[in-house]
Every structure is written in C-alpha cells, then in structure tokens.
Amino acid sequence: MRKRIVALCALLLLAGCAGKKERSITIAQQYGTAYAPIAVMRELDLLEQELPDYIAVEWAQLANTAAIRESMLAGKTDFACMAIPPFLIGRDAGMEWRICSGVSRVPMGLTTSDPAVQSLADITPEMRIALPQPGSIQHILLAMAARRELGEARRFDDQLVTLSHPDGMSALLAGGEVSLHFTASPYLQQEQQAGMTLLLDGEEAMGQPYTGIVAVAGESLYRENPKVYQGFLNALEKSIRWIKDNPEEAAQLLAPLYGMEPDALLLEMTAPGAAYTTEVAGVEAFGAFMLEEGYLKAEHPLNTLLFPEAAS
C-alpha cells in the first residue's frame, strides 16, 4: 500500500511539472479598436498555436507608451504595440528596438466641447487638451497641424493633459478642466455621438495616410529567439486575415471587450480610414518632422528602425 501511495505522489508531482511553463512572453498594448488584431490573437489563442508548449503567453494593457517603454526596459515586455512617434522617441533615447509589423490604421481626431472653437486659432492658452501623453501620435499630429495652420508646431505643448483614451473622454464629456481631446476609435466616434465637435482629422493633420499602430520588438529578442519572433508575426498575420475574412464574427467576439454593441463595433472596424494591415507607412515623415521641431535629437535611417520583415 505504501509503495502505491509513493508511486501516486510521484505521478502527481510529474504531472504538475509537466503542466508548468518554463518561460513566458508578454505582449503589451493600450486602449481602443486600433488594437483589435491583438485582441483577436489573444481571444483565439493564435499566438499559443505558433509557440512551443513550454512558453506561456501573457497580455498587458498599459495606459500609455511611457509605461510600455519602462516595461520593456525592465524586461517585463517582449512585444509592444504603439504608434510611430513614441517608438521614435524611445529609439532616439537609446532603446534597442525596431518595428516588426504594422497593426492598424484607425480614424483619429481632435474634438472639443466648446462651440466657440471652430479652428486651432480659436484655442486659447487657458484651454486644456487631453491626450495619452506628450510625444504620443496625437501630440505629434497636433503639432503638425499647428505648424501648418499657425506657423508654430509647439503652440499647444504647455496645454496638454496626460490621460488615457477612456479617461480623456470622461473628462471631456464631464466638462471643466478639459476643453479638447485628441483621441482614436472608438472614443472619437463616441464623443461625436455625445455632441462633441470634430475640429481636426488625423490624416488632415499629417497630410498623408499613416500607420496608426505598429508592433515593436527588442533587437535582442530578434537575434536570440527567432522562433518566438516569427511565431508572433505568424499569429498577427492570421489575426488580421481572420478579421478581414470574418468581420461580423470579429465584431461579435470583441464587442464585450470594448463595451459596445456588435453592430456599432462592426461599423467602426469597417469605416472609411480604418484598416487592419501589416503595412508600415509614415515612419520617415514622422521622423523628419520630429527632428526638425526638436522632438528627436538625431536622424535615424529607415533601415535602422525596421526589421527586414517590416521593410519588405
């Protein structure tokens, strides 16, 4: 009897060890439908299907790219999804990371609760503008528009309030401190439905189409874990293809995550200007502007910013 108990304990111990993952990777993202391919990847376990069984996959949702940069520097994040300007700022500061793929293009825009504000020229110095953080794509798009319309890129730099997209929308709709909010889907559409005025469109500010969200990985991961790197790219491509092939199912799957009705989410995901694609566009244009206006200290050639897969 004693031998049987010992044998059973040994089997249980081995089973526990077999179920334990030897290592994990973490993917970080922010808020909004721009990250729909990452959400689909998570919900359908697409990344797990591409990786060895001993690797666990963890997911993190962070408020802004400053938090993502800190997480990657601390070794807590392996892949991150963000906009091009904050990626460039991180690279300029010495971050050893590159873009591995595009993720999405989604409508972005600056809305206001003040009916007296009809153009950027009407924004007074005491008005506060909510956006995810200084150096975010919303900030740089605002600076581009300010230079084009007012001749001064940094006109509004001292009026920015750092808030996540959900918190920024809440502050704008509540009135008070925040008079304007530069945001993205689905918050942009929700604010307009609530009566806010769209003052500036993202592509209008940029002057050309651009990739809204890119996927970024560290150069060390690319060198040392090529199978993990390729597994992530494979899963992302499958996720984007699944969304394109199954838009109604994608909306049904993701609607609870965004607190939306599936029909409303489907309209946003298929709206003009919205696209889920691995294409990367706008890196050089953002980099040139940011260098000219002092948001970057040095010029960074395109081939130092993109992994070969993203450049092809």
Image (cartoon, helix red, strand yellow):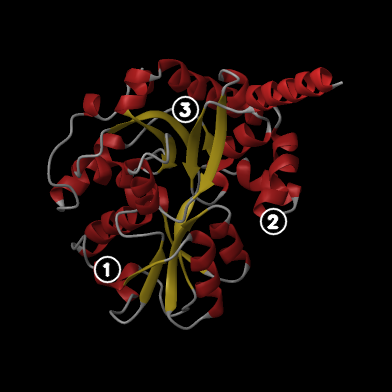
Q: What residue type is labelled 3?
A: Thr
Q: Nearer the viewer, mark 2 or mark 3?
A: 2
Query: Which mark is on residue 278?
Result: 3
Query: Which mark is on residue 156?
Result: 1
Residue 253 pos. (x, y %): 73, 40
Front residue (pair 226, 141): 226
Helix, strand or loop for disc 3: loop
Q: Is residue 183 above or below residue 9?
A: below
Helix, strand or loop for disc 2: loop
Quarter of the image where one finds residue 243: top right
Query: Callout 1: few (<14), some (14-19), or many (20+) C-alpha neighbours within 10 Å?
Result: some
Label whose residue precedes the other's in the sequence (2 or 3): 2
Helix, strand or loop for disc 1: loop
Query: Which mark is on residue 266?
Result: none
Q: Is residue 43 visible?
A: yes
The N terminus lies in which quarter of the figure?
top right
Q: In this view, does 144 lie above or below 207?
A: below
